[in-house]
Image (tube, rainbow, N blue to C red):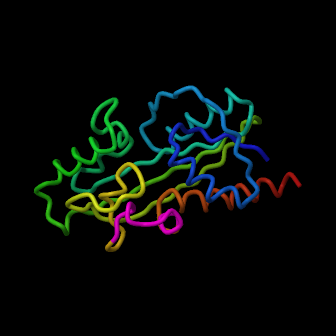
Amino acid sequence: MKFVIATHNTHKLEEFERILTPLGVQIALRELSDVEETGETFAENAFLKAESAMKETGLPAIADDSGLMVDALNGAPGVYSARYAGEGGTYDDVIRKLLFEMRDVPEENRTARFVSSICCVFPDGETLRAEGVCEGMIAFEKRGEGGFGYDPVFLVGDRSFAEMTGAEKDAVSHRGRALRAFSKILEERIGKED
């Protein structure tokens, strides 16, 4: 079955492909319109993106909305994770802002979590949803060369996401957990068609 992935983020697309392709999911790459993320939750934004991509392509569409929630910042940046440093801000800009705002927060209070909400909308209107959470800590400085976004400052144990291989990150990350939960739901749905 062919699906379109509703993202412009090549890093997210790579994670989707690593986890969903072994299920026999064929990913149709399409240029998609940007969707304004007006939802108040990750789940609402994932639905908006998936629904828009499904309407645009006529194919079942899978979308993710994810972000970082930092306890010392009352859950910020949350749904504004990508835009935390303002429109057009780079990954370095959002990390710089985060580390500045946490400059006086001691190590024991630097708890945070990454959240990923996955939504799939089918042309018949059926909607599948899954969520994954990864608990961690915010580092005092960037560590590692891999990953993207907040990965260099998000620690799971003694390593940042940016210090992990793709497979290591997928095994513990919020998106890896959400996609594995989603894949089970999707397998059940595909099994009903057979």
Q: What stretch is highlighted in magenta?
A: 159-170
Q: State the image coordinates of residue 62 (x, y, percent, origin top left).
A: 63, 43
Could you tell me which residue is drawn at 29 percent across and 54 percent down? 70
Q: Quadrant of the C terminus?
A: bottom right
- Residue 77 located left or right of residue 168: left
Nearest to the observer: residue 12 or residue 51: 12
Q: How many labels does the image show?
A: 0
- Taking the spot 50% from the left edge, 41% from the top edge, the residue there is 9
Name of the residue lying farthest toward the bottom: 158
Query: Quadrant of residue 86 in the image?
Result: top left
User: Would residue 73 appear left or right of 31 to someone viewing this image?
Assistant: left
**Residue 76: percent from the left, percent from the top?**
29, 47
Residue at the image point whose x is 53% and y is 37% from the top: 8
Identify the residue at horizontal 16%, vertical 48% (top origin).
100
The residue most toward the right is 194
On the image, the x and y values in percent for residue 176 come to 54, 60
Magenta segment, principal secondary structure? helix
Q: Is residue 30 above or below residue 105?
A: above
Q: Residue furthest front?
A: 145
Is 161 in the magenta? yes
Asked if residue 131 is positioned above or below residue 91 in the image, the reply reads: below
In reply to whether residue 4 is colored magenta, the answer given is no
2 relative position to 31: left or right:
right
